[in-house]
Image (spheres, grey):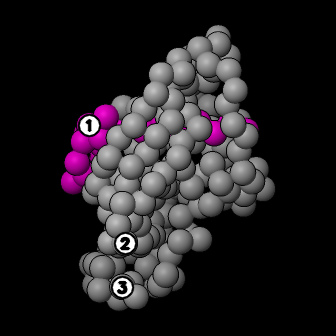
Amino acid sequence: MAVKNVLRMGDPFLLQRAKEVEQFDTPELNQLVEDMLETMAACDGAGLAAPQVGVDLRLVIFGIEHNPRYPDAEQVPQTVLINPVIELLGDEMDVAWEGCLSLPGMRGAVPRYTEIRYTGVDQFGEPIDRTVSGFHARVVQHECDHLDGILYPQRIKDIRYFGFTDELFAEGSLGNPSQPCED
């Protein structure tokens, strides 16, 4: 196992659509999953997409129990999701702060759908089909965006709510994104 280098915003590799995974339960795929899990843990991430570590595959991992970057977040089961498809369940959205391992030290207020269904397979080719809401839905949408070359700043509606974490959350700062960012 190895902690991989996480590509940062500005690397053109992060802006392309990743390719479908065609073979499952191979030594190479299993090693990639292990490396990604180790990298996510080392970086205190809630999720990680294969393109973030320079691999052109439609593969994301996510999961959170206790995370210092998201101290108030609900738990999300550790998941390996390959070739995901997201179905939006309703029009309701909310705006919340997001960060990304490809934008270290930064946060942005991002609108996301509150309830989704996602399907795909795990690294062994076993089907996954879940209906989720809240933070779980947010994490899945964020990670799957990486597979289509989308970084969260591209989804921000009010650029005043994008910046360095230290500045955004300093005393007297903007703080709560929900009202000004609503459409």
Given this view, does label 2 or label 3 mark the residue nearer the observer?
Answer: 2
How many discs appear? 3
Label 1 sits on what residue type?
Glu
Percent x, y of residue 21: 67, 31
Q: Position of residue 160 (x, y in %)?
A: 46, 85
The region drawn magenta spans: 56-77
Q: For residue 182, which numbered disc appears in the image?
A: 3
* Residue at x 53% of width, y 17% of height: 124
From where the camera sits, is residue 69 visible? no
Q: What residue lies at 59% left-to-right and 71% top-to-bottom? A: 154
State which tag comes first along the sequence, 2 or 1. 1
Q: Contact (CB < 8 A) between labels 3 and 1?
A: no
> Is residue 69 on the magenta stretch?
yes
Residue for badge 2: 91
Residue 178 sits in which quadrant? bottom left
Contact (Cβ within 8 Å) of mark 2 with mark 3: no
Q: Position of residue 82 (x, y in %)?
A: 56, 34
- Residue at (21% x, 54% y) in the render: 72
SS category of the residue bearing label 2: loop
Give above or below for 137 relative to 183.
Answer: above
Name the amino acid type tagged 3: Glu
Q: CA distance from mark 2 to mark 1?
A: 28 Å
Residue 147 pos. (x, y %): 63, 48
